[in-house]
Image (spheres, rainbow, N blue to C red):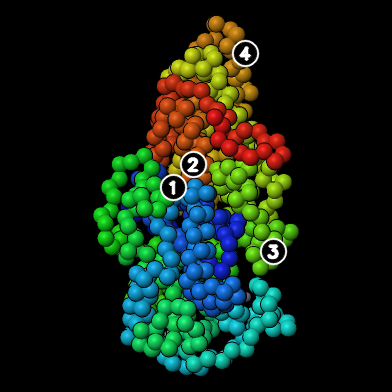
């Protein structure tokens, strides 16, 4: 079994912000979960570096486009380890290997008869690097996304005959109702297709910052086609996952064969999930499958479209100036807390508001209290009452409450229901907290006649903590690892996520997983 997940490649004409972290964190949860299943996983992220906006920004700074791309790409590469993302490769569209694949595939698309020379005239947003259809132009000829003045452009370009894929795309959407999720995005893409597809520019004539069109070097490929092909090109030259070149950690818990070095396409293509934000839906849900059909390449299995993180009701973006800095949040609360908050507070797939206040509240009430405190109390009681040794007997009532949990979480994650899966797990974290209150082990400890009951309660708590921690591992990789180590059960494979599967034998002391925060205090690792 293999699993291939991608983030969009991030445009280098900006610094990384929370929206980038959000998509990468979600992809990382998917990648880590599938590694827990023992699958071969390839997790790709990277940067999109060509196009007019980069050339313009470089010019304004008195730099060459490549210099700007190098500098900004490095910022995105550095984001991944800060948020504990285990991407197996970081692609740059200025990689010569990528550029060569773009030229090969788009030449094939031309040879297959889907490219012609034509004249394009329309409203163009330099920030989007895209022409706008007449019905997308805001009043005053403004970009609906960037609120900047659009320019009227006319160019002799090579065109991609998108309109000839109208019927194949309608058939694709009829046959594969899960090609795009959530359903609202599927409907949006389908209605765009049904509204009538027009051919789109494949090249730009006046630009030089891009992949040259091999049959006509006065043109470069339109940046979107160059960018989309990264998902495919990366597999032809990325090192095998687990070889330690990027942050990818190979398989969780070991035991799966690594693919050999060389071309990974046969192992990982088609991609299982492309994660995208809704502003790039059309490129991914319409242009991308049409381009692959035109090249005779198998289509990806699923696009999952997440919503926007909103601050004051508007999308966060650099150009709107309302960016919440993920690095500040990580400095103060740690990367686990940021990962948890973003997938817990906003239902993945929908828009939702984020704020520092709700972040702090989730940290205190859920991470520090529900989970961190449960772990500390349980381990402290086992150490205090039983010198760290855990008995064999488990409470059957609690086992029933955990029945089928691992399967349920897997099903939800297969549907990219990352918030739903977290809800399921958190329900059991809360169940364990109620169990502590119901059983009051500190009272049992005072009555020697109830020693067996105390053993059972403490053993049940340790086992429950182990199970939720295995399932939480993709979301909270650092703290669950510390807790599972303290429980003496380092196995994180999904096969051990059933209650009673991986009996805790003994525990050792654990520093608080999520220390209480005073205002302004940096997180830091507990000594
Ligand atoms: Zn725009």
Mark positioned earlier in the residue sequence (1 or 3): 1
Residue pictured at 69% horizontal, 75% vertical: 147
Q: Position of residue 521 (x, y in %)?
A: 67, 38
Q: Which sits earlier in the primary sequence, circle 2 or circle 3? A: 3
Q: Are marks 2 and 1 in contact (CB under 8 Å)?
A: yes
Disc 3 from disc 4: Cα separation: 55 Å
Hey, which quadrant is residue 515 in on the image?
A: top right
Q: Earlier in the sequence, mark 1 or mark 4?
A: 1
Q: CA distance from mark 2 to mark 3?
A: 31 Å
Q: Residue at x 72, y 39 (%)?
A: 519
Q: Of the residues under marks 3 and 4, which one precedes in the sequence?
A: 3
- What residue appears at the point 62 percent right and 22 percent down from the top-left corner? 438
Residue 281 visible, this angle: no
Density class for disc 3 (Cα within 10 Å; few <14, some 14-19, many ≥20) is few
Q: Nearer the viewer, mark 1 or mark 4?
A: 1
* Residue drawn at 50 percent across, 36 percent down: 480
Checking the image for residue 4, the label placed there is none
Residue 491 vertical placement versus 245 (above, below): above
Quick one: label 4, few (<14), some, or many (20+) residues within 10 Å?
A: few
Disc 1, SS: helix
Where residue 284 appears, as percent x and y from the top left, is 49, 70
Q: Nearer the viewer, residue 168 or 497?
A: 497
Badge 2: how crowded within 10 Å, few (<14), some, or many (20+)?
some
Closer to us: mark 4 or mark 2? Answer: 2
Question: Is 209 situated above or below 499?
Answer: below
**Residue ID for mark 2:** 477
The residue tagged 3 is 321
């Amino acid at each position: 079994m293999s699993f291939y997940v991608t983030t969009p490649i991030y445009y280098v004409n900006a610094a990384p912000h929370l929206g980038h972290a959000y998509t990468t964190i979600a992809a990382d949860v998917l990648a880590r979960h599938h590694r827990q299943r023992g699958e071969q996983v390839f997790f790709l992220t990277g940067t999109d570096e060509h196009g007019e906006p980069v050339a313009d920004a470089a010019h304004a700074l008195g730099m060459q486009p490549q210099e700007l791309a190098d500098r900004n790409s490095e910022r995105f590469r550095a984001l991944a380890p800060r948020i504990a993302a285990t991407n197996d490769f970081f692609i740059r569209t200025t990689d010569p290997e990528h550029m060569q694949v773009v030229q090969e595939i788009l030449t094939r698309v031309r040879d297959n008869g889907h490219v012609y020379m034509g004249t394009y005239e329309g409203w163009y947003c330099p920030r989007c690097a895209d022409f706008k259809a007449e019905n997308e132009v805001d009043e005053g000829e403004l970009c609906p996304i960037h609120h900047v003045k659009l320019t009227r452009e006319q160019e002799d370009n090579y065109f991609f005959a998108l309109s000839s894929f109208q019927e194949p795309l309608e058939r694709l959407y009829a046959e594969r109702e899960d090609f795009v999720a959530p359903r609202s995005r599927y409907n949006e893409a389908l209605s765009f297709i049904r509204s009538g597809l027009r051919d789109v520019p494949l090249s730009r004539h006046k630009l030089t910052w891009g992949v040259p069109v091999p049959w006509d070097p006065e043109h470069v490929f339109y940046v979107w086609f160059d960018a989309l092909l990264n998902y495919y090109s990366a597999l032809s030259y990325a090192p095998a996952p687990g070889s330690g070149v990027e942050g990818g950690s190979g398989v969780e818990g070991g035991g799966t064969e690594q693919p050999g070095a060389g071309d990974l396409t046969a192992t990982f293509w088609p991609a299982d999930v492309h994660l995208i934000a809704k502003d790039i839906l059309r490129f991914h849900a319409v242009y991308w499958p049409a381009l692959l059909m035109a090249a005779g390449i198998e289509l990806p299995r699923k696009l999952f479209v997440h919503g926007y993180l909103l601050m004051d009701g508007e999308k966060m973006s650099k150009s709107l100036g309302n960016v919440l800095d993920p690095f500040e949040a990580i400095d103060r609360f740690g990367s686990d807390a940021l990962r948890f908050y973003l997938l817990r507070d906003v239902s993945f797939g929908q828009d939702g508001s984020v704020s520092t206040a709700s972040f702090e509240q989730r940290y205190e009430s859920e991470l520090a209290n529900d989970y961190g405190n449960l772990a500390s109390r349980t381990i402290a009681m086992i150490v205090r009452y039983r010198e760290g040794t855990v008995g064999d007997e488990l409470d059957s009532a609690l086992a029933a409450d955990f029945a089928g949990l691992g399967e349920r979480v897997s099903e939800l994650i297969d549907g990219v229901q990352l918030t739903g899966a977290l809800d399921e797990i958190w329900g059991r974290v809360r169940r364990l907290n109620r169990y502590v209150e119901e059983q009051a082990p500190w009272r049992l400890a005072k009555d020697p006649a109830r020693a067996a009951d105390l053993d059972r309660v403490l053993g049940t708590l340790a086992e429950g903590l182990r199970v939720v921690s295995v399932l939480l591992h993709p979301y909270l990789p650092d703290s669950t690892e510390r807790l599972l180590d303290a429980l003496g059960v380092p196995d994180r494979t999904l096969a051990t996520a059933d209650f009673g599967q991986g009996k805790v034998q003994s525990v050792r002391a654990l520093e608080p997983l999520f220390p209480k925060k005073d205002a302004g205090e940096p997180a830091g690792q507990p000594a």
